[in-house]
Structures are given as structure tokens and as C-alpha cells.
Image (tube, helix red, strand yellow):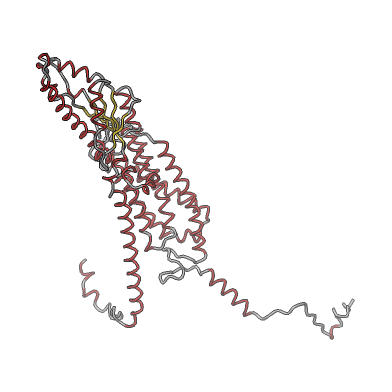
């Protein structure tokens, strides 16, 4: 086998070829150098566009955390509730921490849990009866559970990264600070009292008057959650890009010979089939890697969950495939990576960040298929922050709009092919790489005009020629009858 590539086998093959520095190909070399410089410029634009989109969405994340609101809910109504509420609301507001507000509308811990799961980021609840239990312990009661004083309620299923970086840390840090401050005040007051009846309290309650427990009403903090849907959809998208490029490069005979209505139906059907297959693989991979028991606290993974996971991925992949194929049909080869980068980066960013932590420009992430698909997946798996109507509506609207746009793109592409405007690879007439066996339509028109000009001019009117020897004349009217 190695003999096939040996120098002996190649001996004499270069005899008819010239050096790269030969004068005969100097013009071609000059053209290639210019083309490569253009590619370098295009690559520079693409990498800066991608990095700017990503870092522009995350670089101010730590100073925009106060766009997130967390709440203090006093269900106690006594001294503990009043003091803890005051301490929490007096917490210094900084750009890197969420803002504390008070909620007066909720009247039970279960109501707070339901509210946080549906629409809130998190809440600190002063539990009912906290003041009575503490007063009893300070009066000498033997048993006291400090952690029953407060409940920290969070919902990591809403947006895992923001919850883990800012909301959860804000709740825990504030609760710990309140507990230390409350203990210091209480010990100071105890030392200053002269009432002998107060000298035999429950010292555990005196030193540690308020504690807390944390409840995650929609747990998604398992190992894969921040990147699960992100990299699943990213793998699908990258797989689709290769197929779309292949379709673009090999579709020239179809556009030259197949009816427009057939093409307008064929490509969306093929894309839908591709999306179904690839998203099925994603759903199976998630099921195989994590299985139904991916999180003991999360919602039960059922057969319906699998199909929801599958069809959500299909909608995401289908909308992105339609979007990118619209671009690929018309772009020249050196530009085909640009829409891919400008599609991948914002979509990935929409799942690893949240709008509250990004500049206003990034409200466009509401339209990103990755964002809507990931929101649906988190809701399916955890039940958190249900925006299913909006997410499904956005995906369906994008699929309809992209299908209509693809129909127009196919029509334009077919016209360009049939008129010789662009070739199989997407190069346009006039490019040095353009090659098409279909003549350019303007050249055809010019040739027709040239042929028409070369014909002898026609005389106006009708010329009648009579032959005298046959006795018949159209001029005199003698028809020989």
C-alpha cells in the first residue's frame, strides 16, 4: 500500500508543471493572494461579531443583578417578623445583588411557594408563630428549633445560572446576616436586663434565635442542567449546518430541471424529517445518560415527558434549519459561516444568561429558538415559570415565517440558476470562480439582438412581380380566366 504513495511512483509526474514563482501563473497567484486576504478580513469580521455578541451579553452581568427582585414575606406578624423584615429591607443595595422588596399579598407558606414557582425569583419567609416560639424558649422552654423561624424559597428551574449565581446566594447571605444581627441584638438586650426571671432562658434560643431552611420548589440544580438543553440544541444545529451546506452545493440540477412548486414542498419536508431524527437522538441521549431518575426532587420522567422533549427539540431544530437554509441558498461560499456564527452565539447566550442580566439590546433573545426551547424543557422537567403559551407561540410563528421566506428564497434561487446569474456553489456571474453551463441571460439577449441586426433589412409594403410570357397579371387583373 505504501508503494502507491512512494516517490518512485510519482517520478516524472511534475515534469509538465511549473514553479509557484513562474511568470506564467503570476497573475493567478496574485488573484489567489487577494482572495485569501479577503477571507482573512471576512474571518476577522466573523470572529469579532461572534465574540462581541457573546461578551456584550455577559460582561455587565454582575452589575445588573439589581434588575432581579427577591421578596421578604412576613407571615409571623410579631416581633421576629417585624425585626427580620426591617433588617432585610435595610440591606445595602449594590449593582451586584438583587433588590429586596416586601410582599403583603401572600398569607401562607404554600402560597409563597406557588407564587415563586409560577413567576417569582425567590423569597425569604418569616414563618407563622416564629415570635411565639422564640418568646416561649426565652422564657425557659426546653425545646427550640431555630430553623423553623425562616424559610428560603427558590426556584432553580426558572433560570439555573441566574438562580445559582445571584438569587440563591442573595437569599442565603441575607438570611445568615439577619441571624447574626438578631443574635447580637438579643444577647446585648439580655445582658442589659435586670429582671431575674429572664436570667434562665433557653441559651440555644438566646444565641441562635433565628435560623432557616431552604426549599427549592422547582429543582433544576442537577449536574447537567445549566448546559443540558444548550449543548443538546447546539449539537443538533451543528449537525444541520453540514447537511444544509451539502444540500446547497448539490441542488443545482434540481433548480435547473424541477418545478418550483415541487422544490417549495420538498425542502421544508426534508428539513422537518431531519429535525425529527436529530431531536429524537437528543431525547434518547438525555434518557440514556440521566434516565428517569435524573433528579430525585424533580418531576417524574414519564413517556409523555420523552415525547415533549422530542417534539420541543424538533421545533427548535426545524425553525433554525429553515432560517439558515434561507441564508445558505443565496450566500457565496466565503460568507456562509457568517450567519452560522451570528445564529449560534445569540442562541447559546439566551440559555446561559437571562434578560435581567444583559443590556436592553438582548431582549432579542426572547425570539431565540434555543431560549424558547430551553424554557419549555425546564418547565417540562421542573414545572417552573410556565410561559408555555409564549414559547410555543414564538416557535410556531418562526416556523411559519421561515417557511414562507424559504418559499420566496427558493423562487429567487431558481430564477438566478435559470438565468445564469449564479452557479451551483453560489458564485455570481462576474466572479472569477463562477462556472455554469447555463448562459447568462443578458448575454443571450445581446446575442439575439446581434443576430437580428445582422439580418438584411426588410422592405416596407408588398412587391408584385409579373411575368409577361404567361398572360396572367395581378397588376392588370387578367387572371387567365
Residue 288 makes an appearance in the image: no
Q: Quadrant of residue 316?
A: top left
* Residue in front for this viewpoint, 8 or 147: 147
Identify the residue at the far right of this view: 481
Give percent across and percent down for residue 371. 35, 43
**Closest to the observer: 345 or 357?**
357
Image quadrant occupied by the N terminus: bottom left
Instruction: Say which of 284 and 136 sits in front.
Output: 136
Q: Is residue 1 left or right of residue 194?
A: right
Q: What residue is shown at x 37% (from left), y 36% (from top)?
A: 308
Q: How many marks?
A: 0
Q: Is residue 61 in view from this perspective? A: yes
Query: Image point 44% across, 54% down: which residue?
Result: 326
The percent coordinates of residue 140 (x first, y second) are 13, 15
Residue drawn at x 36%, y 55% is: 340
- Vertical comparison of 8 with 119: above or below: below
Position in image of residue 424 (x %, y %): 43, 63
On the image, the x and y values in percent for residue 356 come to 33, 42
Decide if residue 360 is on the left or right side of residue 195: right
Along the horizontal axis of the image, is 436 left or right of 129?
A: right
Q: Is residue 47 above or below residue 67?
A: below
| Residue furthest top in the image | 197
Of the 4 image quadrants, the one containing the C terminus is bottom right
Amino acid at each position: 500500500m505504501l508503494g502507491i504513495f512512494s516517490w518512485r511512483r510519482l517520478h516524472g509526474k511534475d515534469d509538465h508543471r511549473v514553479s509557484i514563482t513562474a511568470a506564467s501563473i503570476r497573475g493567478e497567484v496574485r488573484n489567489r493572494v487577494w482572495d485569501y486576504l479577503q477571507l482573512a478580513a471576512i474571518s476577522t469580521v466573523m470572529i469579532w461579531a461572534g465574540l462581541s455578541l457573546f461578551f456584550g451579553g455577559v460582561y455587565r452581568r454582575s452589575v445588573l443583578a439589581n434588575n432581579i427582585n427577591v421578596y421578604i414575606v412576613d407571615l409571623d406578624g410579631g416581633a421576629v417578623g417585624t425585626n427580620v423584615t426591617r433588617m432585610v429591607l435595610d440591606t445595602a443595595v449594590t449593582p451586584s445583588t438583587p433588590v429586596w422588596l416586601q410582599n403583603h399579598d401572600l398569607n401562607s407558606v404554600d402560597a409563597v411557594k406557588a407564587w415563586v414557582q409560577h413567576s417569582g425569583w425567590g423569597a425569604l419567609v418569616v414563618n407563622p408563630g416564629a415570635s411565639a416560639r422564640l418568646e416561649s424558649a426565652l422564657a425557659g422552654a426546653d425545646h427550640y428549633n431555630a430553623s423553623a423561624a425562616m424559610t428560603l424559597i427558590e426556584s432553580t428551574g426558572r433560570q439555573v445560572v441566574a438562580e445559582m449565581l445571584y438569587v440563591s446566594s442573595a437569599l442565603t447571605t441575607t438570611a445568615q446576616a439577619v441571624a447574626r444581627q438578631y443574635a447580637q441584638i438579643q444577647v446585648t438586650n439580655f445582658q442589659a436586663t435586670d429582671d431575674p426571671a429572664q436570667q434562665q432562658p433557653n441559651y440555644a434560643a438566646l444565641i441562635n434565635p433565628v435560623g432557616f431552611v431552604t426549599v427549592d420548589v422547582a429543582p433544576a440544580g442537577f449536574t447537567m442542567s445549566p448546559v443540558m438543553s444548550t449543548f443538546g440544541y447546539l449539537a443538533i444545529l451543528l449537525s444541520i449546518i453540514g447537511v444544509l451546506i451539502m444540500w446547497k452545493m448539490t441542488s443545482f440540477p434540481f433548480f435547473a430541471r424541477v418545478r418550483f412548486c415541487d422544490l417549495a414542498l420538498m425542502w421544508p419536508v426534508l428539513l422537518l424529517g431531519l429535525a425529527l431524527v436529530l431531536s429524537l437522538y437528543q431525547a434518547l441521549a438525555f434518557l440514556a445518560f440521566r434516565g428517569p431518575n435524573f433528579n430525585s426532587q424533580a418531576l417524574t420522567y414519564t413517556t409523555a415527558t420523552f415525547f415533549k422533549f422530542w417534539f420541543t427539540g424538533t421545533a427548535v431544530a426545524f425553525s433554525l434549519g429553515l432560517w439558515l437554509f434561507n441564508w445558505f441558498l443565496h450566500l457565496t461560499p466565503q460568507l456562509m459561516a457568517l450567519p452560522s456564527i451570528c445564529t449560534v452565539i445569540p442562541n447559546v447566550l439566551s440559555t446561559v444568561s437571562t434578560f435581567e442580566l444583559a443590556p436592553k439590546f438582548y431582549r432579542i433573545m426572547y425570539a431565540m429558538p434555543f431560549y424558547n426551547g430551553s424554557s419549555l424543557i425546564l418547565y417540562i422537567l421542573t414545572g417552573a415559570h410556565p410561559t408555555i403559551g409564549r414559547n410555543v407561540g414564538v416557535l410556531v410563528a418562526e416556523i411559519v415565517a421561515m417557511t414562507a421566506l424559504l418559499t420566496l428564497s427558493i423562487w429567487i434561487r431558481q430564477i438566478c440558476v435559470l438565468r445564469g446569474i449564479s452557479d451551483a456553489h453560489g458564485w455570481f456571474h462576474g466572479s472569477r470562480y463562477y462556472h455554469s453551463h447555463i448562459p447568462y441571460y443578458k448575454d443571450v439577449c445581446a446575442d439575439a439582438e446581434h443576430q437580428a441586426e445582422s439580418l438584411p433589412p426588410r422592405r416596407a409594403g408588398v412587391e408584385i412581380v409579373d411575368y409577361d410570357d404567361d398572360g396572367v397579371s395581378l397588376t392588370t387583373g387578367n387572371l387567365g380566366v
